[in-house]
Amino acid sequence: QLSSKLGRKELGICAAIFTAVVLILAYFLQISNAWVFVAFYGLAYSGIGCFMLITWAMITDVIDHTEVQTNERSDGMIYSVYSFARK
């Protein structure tokens, strides 16, 4: 479990940086071979996938933290605000 060793926020940051490095490298290399292109973007999207998983895991942390602060469970409101902000 990487998130338990690094922490969720740190793992999200590492995944985003990894994705950015791979995509910037792919841009500057100007890859002409289709299979190398697919390999680079496969690596990049594995980083994006990790980032998205961690993002959704952090939403539950926000819901739990809000419940501790307000003594009120408002997961529907938090999720709807998050969904609206993403759009």
Image (tube, rainbow, N blue to C red):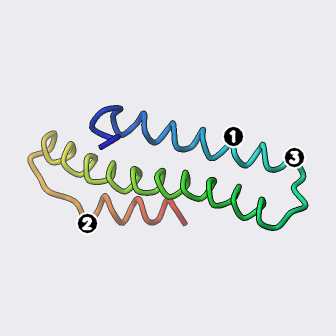
* Distance between the alpha carbons at the discs numbered 1 and 3: 12 Å
What residue do we see at 46% from left, 42% from top?
Answer: 12
x and y percentages locating residue 53 in the rendered image: 40, 56
Residue 15 placement, left or right of 72: right
* Distance between the alpha carbons at the discs numbered 2 and 1: 36 Å
What residue do we see at 16% from left, 39% from top?
Answer: 69
Give the residue pinned by disc 1. Answer: 21
Disc 1 versus disc 3: nearer the observer: 3
Disc 2 versus disc 1: nearer the observer: 1
SS category of the residue bearing label 3: helix
Give the residue pinned by disc 2. Answer: 76
Tag 1: amino acid: Val
- The residue nearer to you, when weighing 77 against 23, is 23
Give the residue pinned by disc 3. Answer: 29
- Give whichever of discs 2 and 3 has the lower sequence position: 3
Tag 3: amino acid: Leu
Q: Quadrant of the N terminus?
A: top left
x and y percentages locating residue 84 in the rendered image: 47, 65
Q: Quadrant of the C terminus?
A: bottom right
- The residue nearer to you, when weighing 12 against 47, is 47
